[in-house]
Amino acid sequence: MASNHKHGDPLPETVLRVKSLESLLIEKGLVEAEALDALIDRYENKVGPKNGAKVVARAWVDEEYRQRLLTDATAAVAEFGFTGAQGEELVAVENTDKIHNVVVCTLCSCYPWPVLGLPPVWYKSAPYRARVVREPRKVLEEFGTLLPDDMEVRVWDSTAETRYLVIPKRPKGTDGMDEEALAQLVNRDSMIGTREAGKLPVAEGT
Amino acid sequence: MQLDPALQAIDIPQDGDGPVFEEPWQAQAFAMTVKLNEAGQFSWSEWADVFGAEISADTASGHGVGNTAYYLCWLSALEKIVTQKNLLTTEQLSTRKAEWHEASEHTPHGQPIEIHKSRK
């Protein structure tokens, strides 16, 4: 970036390309500089997997909310004020004793931004996108998630129109915990389906 | 269909946290795309098609891992979609890039880089 460049050095090609797009789009009134800054701030500081963790914890303690989430996830997360700008539909898929769900976008990186923020590097990587479809159990093992042989694994391929949120299983021994404490157990990867809840504190999954 | 051996050889990155964007240009490219979509200049499906094609080509050439590779695909897709939608021309983009290049070469370190206001 500009702060790194030495006297007289040209800016890197990539930065020049981005500055060119930005300055032209601003001059033509197609985007506003302040709006770009506000959006970046939103994704860097405000939208993240803590949103999804609140949704999951509510579903664990409130059966009526769980039903609403499974029926119409877009509307159910909007109850928290989490809404998507891209007009996509959100679908919640629930892990049970018999079914484990895991989410991918084989095309690019479609991801439920309003509840999880932007995707981690591994989600965007070619090997994850290709392999989780073909050998989901092996990929899950690499994430430290070992599933019983009789567990059915369902892989959901996200699209521009449909994004998925996994509702992980509520960890055992959490009966007395309230919603706020439960939300701390819901890590980002558990809502993509590569890990289970309760394995990582949510702060590490941000 | 067999899995591409090139992909078998690459480990899935196991990043934990990390910043959302590694460099400011990545954030800017992201934000411009979302704002143009919100303004109705293109649908998110149209974006996903163009972006997906970039990713697919990048993967085929043996890349496809890491934030930088990802956002370079994003940037190429953004350049394509703004010209496809006649928001900007490739000529405008290349002229403007040359201007920024020129300005950055002639700006002493520590000064903000600006291109001539009269060009607007």
Image: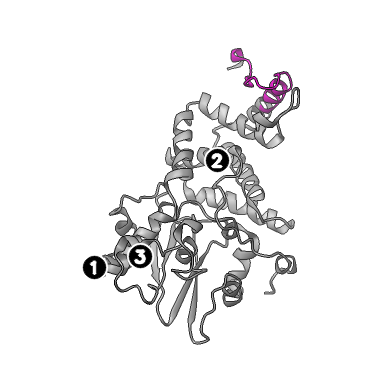
Residue B27's label in the rendered image is 2
**Which sits in the foreground, B104 or A1?**
A1
Q: Residue furthest bottom?
A: A150
How far is mark 2 from mark 1, CA to CA? Answer: 38 Å
On the image, which quarter does residue B98 sit in? top right
User: Which one is earlier in the sequence, the residue at label 1 or at label 3?
Assistant: 1
- Residue type at tag 1: Glu
Q: Is residue B100 above or below residue A107?
A: above
How far is mark 1 from mark 3, CA to CA? Answer: 17 Å
> Residue B113: within the magenta?
yes
Q: Is residue B60 left or right of residue B28?
A: right
Of badges 1 and 3, the one in the foreground is 3
Query: What is the chain letter for disc 2?
Result: B
> Which residues are drawn in magenta?
B97-118
Question: For the C terminus of chain B, which image quadrant?
Answer: top right
Find numbered disc 3 in the image and state the secondary structure of the residue it sits on.
Answer: helix
Of badges 2 and 3, the one in the foreground is 3
Taking the image as drawn, is residue B16 in sight?
yes
Point 37% across, 72% down: residue: A170
Find numbered disc 1 in the image and state the secondary structure of the residue it sits on.
Answer: helix
Label 1 crowd bin: few (<14), some (14–19), many (20+), radius 10 Å:
few
Q: Is residue A64 above or below residue B31?
A: below
Residue A85: horizontal and vertical position, in percent? Answer: 40, 46
How far is mark 2 from mark 3, CA to CA? Answer: 32 Å
- Residue type at tag 3: Leu
Residue that label 1 marks: A64
> Residue B107: within the magenta?
yes
Query: What is the chain letter for disc 1?
Result: A
Q: Is residue A20 left or right of residue A81?
A: right
Residue A137: horizontal and vertical position, in percent? Answer: 57, 77
Callout 2 and callout 3 share a chain: no
Residue that label 3 marks: A182
